Amino acid sequence: MGASAPASVGYAVHNRLTYQSITPYGAIMVDDAVARALVLDAPRRLVVREFRVPTVGDDDALLRVSACGLCGTDHEQYTGELASGFAFVPGHETVGTIEAIGSKAAKRWGVAAGDRVAVEVFQSCRDCAACRAGEYRHCERHGLADMYGFIPADREPGLWGGYAEYQYLVSRARNSLHKCNRCGSAVFHGETHWCVG
């Protein structure tokens, strides 16, 4: 457990972070903080890796992961049946608390630091016909390689899946966050999506 933040910062830090400060613009600054994550680096081989916790920009957020669901897709990734490439942080049914969020992202997603949320797996270009129609799961520009839990670990910042202490959330995930009162491991992925809190 990391030390708590200096009194002047006024923002407690969880897990392994040592301290942080929030800028007037809502971006989080983390000094040499790391987060652990499970990385699937080959079929049937999960390894623990540490990633530097990134600075959150105006359009993004950092989620402190509480739970991550498992589904058939996770099994297919683990066994190598679903050929999506290696290595990556699995986990695409994530629930957690917003640790830090940029001002643009907070406005777009309607959430704030401290809110409990469920994360949408799909990312959106916001421009193609499917995205303009609200069918962002059929985005013409973003495929499996851009879905949370599928993004390669060597793409900065690496914390792209729910099998981690923290998950980085990007602006192109248009409908990315769904606020919930009671969240746990009961996140169900499906055509309509999940029901929590």
Image (cartoon, helix red, strand yellow):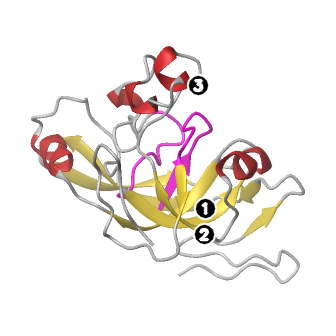
User: In the rendered view, would you say 85 is above or below 150?
Assistant: above
Q: Nearer the viewer, residue 196 or 55?
A: 196
Alpha-carbon span between mark 2 and mark 3:
34 Å
- The residue labelled by disc 2 is 17
Image side of residue 63 versus residue 25, left or right: left
Identify the secondary structure beneath mark 1. loop
- Which residue occupies 58% across, 41% down? 170
Where, by quadrant of the figure, is residue 59 drawn? top right
Identify the secondary structure beneath mark 3. loop
Identify the secondary structure beneath mark 2. loop
Q: Is residue 134 magenta?
A: no
Q: Which mark is residue 8?
A: none
- Asked whether residue 175 appears in the rendered view, the answer is yes
- Which amino acid is tagged 3? Arg
> Residue 65, image x and y in percent?
46, 65
Q: Nearer the viewer, residue 61 or 193?
A: 193
- The residue labelled by disc 1 is 33
- Which amino acid is tagged 1? Ala
- Which amino acid is tagged 2? Leu
Where, by quadrant of the figure, is residue 188 drawn? bottom left
Q: Work out whether mark 2 precedes mark 1 in sequence or the reverse, and give the earlier one.
A: 2
The part of the chain drawn in magenta is 155-176
Q: Residues within 10 Å of mark 3 (few under 14, many from 20)?
A: some
- The residue labelled by disc 3 is 126
> Residue 18, image x and y in percent?
65, 72
- Which residue occupies 81% across, 62% down? 22
Image side of residue 33 versus residue 92, left or right: right
Residues at discs 2 and 1 in contact (Cβ within 8 Å): yes
Q: Residues within 10 Å of mark 1 (few under 14, many from 20)?
A: some
Alpha-carbon span between mark 2 and mark 1:
5 Å
